[in-house]
Image (cartoon, coloured by chain):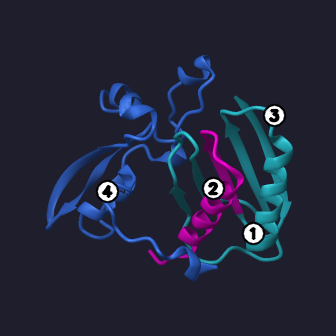
Chain colours: A cyan, B blue
Amino acid sequence: MEQFQVHGAAKSRAGGHRRQAITGVNASGNLEVLVERVLPDHECQVDVTTAVTGFREIWEAVIQEFFARSSPGGLRFSINDGGARPDTVTLRLMQSVQLMEDEA
Amino acid sequence: MSNLLQTYEADWYEASARERVAGLLDANSFVEFLGPEQRAMSPHLAQFDLTGAFDDGIVVGRGRLDGQEVFVAAQEGRFLGGALGMSRRLLK
């Protein structure tokens, strides 16, 4: 198991008004992402807990790419990972931002 | 971006425990007990070097079913086979 944080800057505040959302399941090759609107508008952060050690550099590259594409300002993401591939991680992060943008 | 991701349709097999609860109950009526943001997670998994789930793989709360107030629980079978939340959260 390995744990670390990735911090980033966002150009703008993430859309929508939901306070939190969760997507995905911690299972083999999958991950769960809990997202909460708790940070200042131009900051974002991902807390990673992963079952697989030794891939921190790849995580950081994937997450920084996600920050650049989605600009999720104000959002803190918390991940419980069961060995997901980078494309699955990107998908879940983007799904979680979309959930925050949804109404109700 | 949004349109690419909006291909999901309700599917019992694919749905998570949380999605099944939301799909069963009257819209927006679910109030969760001890939600994932509380991070009330089992302390035992880390001892076995296992990563956990923020809700221990079970969703518990109350809501309305066709207008009637009901209590509801759903287990997430994909997280450790649904075994953990059964032992922990349902007994609280």
Looking at the rendered structure, the secondary structure element under dot 3 is loop
Is residue B18 rendered to the left or right of residue B47?
Answer: left
Q: CA distance from mark 1 to mark 2?
A: 21 Å
Instruction: Give the labeled residue for mark 1.
Output: A73
Q: Quadrant of residue B77?
A: top left
Image disc number at residue A88? 2
Which residue is painted at 37% across and 34% down in the image?
A: B82
Instruction: Give the labeled residue for mark 3.
Output: A54
Specify the segment rendered in magenta: A75-104
Q: Residue B72: where, in percent of width, then height?
A: 24, 48
Looking at the rendered structure, the secondary structure element under dot 2 is helix
Instruction: Give the labeled residue for mark 4.
Output: B20
- The mark nearer the N terminus, 1 or 3, is 3
Q: CA distance from mark 4 to mark 2?
A: 22 Å
Which residue is painted at 76% across and 70% down in the image?
A: A41
Q: To which chain does the residue with label 2 belong?
A: A
| Residue A100 magenta | yes
